[in-house]
Amino acid sequence: MLEENAAKEWVLDAETEYRFELDLGTSIAITLIRGRAEIFGAELVEGKPYLFGSECKAAVFTWVGCTIEVTGQPPTEYISDETPMSAYGNLHIALEQMRVKALANLHGSPVPESVHLAQSKPQAEISAEPPRVLILGPENSGKTSICKILVNYAVRAGQGWAPILANVDPNEGGWACPGALSAAAVHGFIPTCSPANPLGSAATSAPTTLSSNAILPLVYWLIRNLGVNIQEKSDQDPEGSAAGVIVDTPSSFGSSSGTGVNDLRQKLIRACIDAFKINIILVVGHEKLNVEMQRAYGSMLTVLKIPKSGGVVELDHNYRERVHKYQMHAYMYGETMPSPIGIRGGTQGGETLTDFTLAPSANVISFSDLTIYRIGAETMAPSSALPVGAARVVSEIQPVLVDPLQPGSGLLNAVLAVLAPYHPDENERYDEELLDLTVVGFIVITKLDIPHKKMTVLSPTQGSLVGKTAIVGSYEWQD
């Protein structure tokens, strides 16, 4: 139990940061006493306690110096004067130049003289395209933190930018549940307070009093679908598209463990480049990967190597498993942030705490009420098991119907994505059309009653599931 007055002041010099790591069951509050400071690019408001929990690991950085008060006792805390923030700041300025020039080009006007841009390049050499950035790096390289810094700096620029942040790491969760891909236009700061909501809350799981409720993410299963829908939004709002796109990727894109795996990795990177029309690749602290990307794409787009922060924490498998549980629990019930003793009026990611919690419903439905599909090779025999000369009839991304009555259906405790309905004007139906439908929510099957052909489904809302279609992934969750 934390002592009521377990508070300590830390004085940070210019361009240093206070780093902390929380263990299971611990929480802290950080208050900016004087000066200016930020957490992954999001500014702290002076005098307001910011709460952190659920094994959060983060850093408070200052450009000009500050004093902060930390209430609670993090197991790991220290100040570092070796940070990559200068490099990240210069990168932001270069991306800002591209945004301004893209918007000016759209209006057919010169770059405004009133915009103070650091001349890292002559204006003639700055691309007139919006920045569309793909961030690559190995495991535990800090890619998501860099994404948040770049997005938050764009929002802070005061130009009304709302860059699109796309998360194609199914292990991360983003604004969805683990296993899906998501993207959203970000109008306000992305908060950092808990890995249960790594990119902040969205309209599907946040109280209406929170500004994050304005985020309406797109959620899909395929990179292609996410890219197509982002492009459609850009076509409808050319001025908004000048803010650009930043794409966070899984660690598997930045490492290889064999020829076959490397070929698949290259295909996925290429799929991202094509889907999001990438014009900049950022490689985080990995010389070999940087050389590889330079050789493959250096003639077509800009490839830059950026430093990895020394504050990046090595995260093991058990930690990631706990984070998945935090994310699922937060999706179903909302997130409550415990305050250290003695703290009142704390904020969660900079937003005022409320007593709001979600009240998920457990509904019993018939097997026939919900049509369930599974995607992927695990539903089929391997190619090597096919008869000699036989070709596979079912593709590896074709949806395969799942029968709850069959032994080994894998539905108990499985997380399912409920899909939007088919377009009413389309007469023909084909199975792979499912992959073009956006995800409208997630449910968990908590009980299977085989004799009565019934199942119990936990959902954050009380809407009917009759006639709906869902896709089952590989994630399971038990409350």
Image (tube, rainbow, N blue to C red):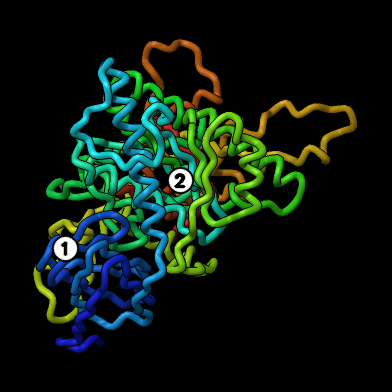
Q: What's the CA distance linking mark 2 and mark 1?
A: 27 Å
Quadrant in the picture for the C terminus: bottom left
Q: Write down the residue under mark 1.
A: 347
Residue drawn at x 38%, y 21% is 232
Residue drawn at x 90%, y 32% is 388
Quadrant in the picture for the N terminus: bottom left
Circle 2 crowding by C-alpha within 10 Å: few under 14, some 14–19, many from 20? many
Residue drawn at x 70%, y 39% is 380
* Percent x, y of residue 475: 50, 53
* Percent x, y of residue 467: 39, 30
Q: Secondary structure at mark 2?
A: strand
Q: Is residue 166 above or below residue 3?
A: above
Q: Amino acid at mark 1?
A: Thr
Q: Which mark is residue 219?
A: none
Evaluate whether residue 463 shows in this view.
no
Q: Amino acid at mark 2?
A: Asp
> Residue 230 or 133: which is nearer the viewer?
133
In this picture, residue 310 sits left or right of residue 233? right
Count of marks, rendered view: 2
Q: Is residue 237 above or below residue 94?
A: above
In this picture, residue 201 sits left or right of residue 232? left
Q: Write down the residue under mark 2.
A: 248
Residue drawn at x 28%, y 47% is 153
- Mark 2 vs mark 1, foreground winner is 2
> Residue 125 or 356: which is nearer the viewer?
125
Q: Secondary structure at mark 1?
A: strand
In this picture, residue 411 sits left or right of residue 359? right
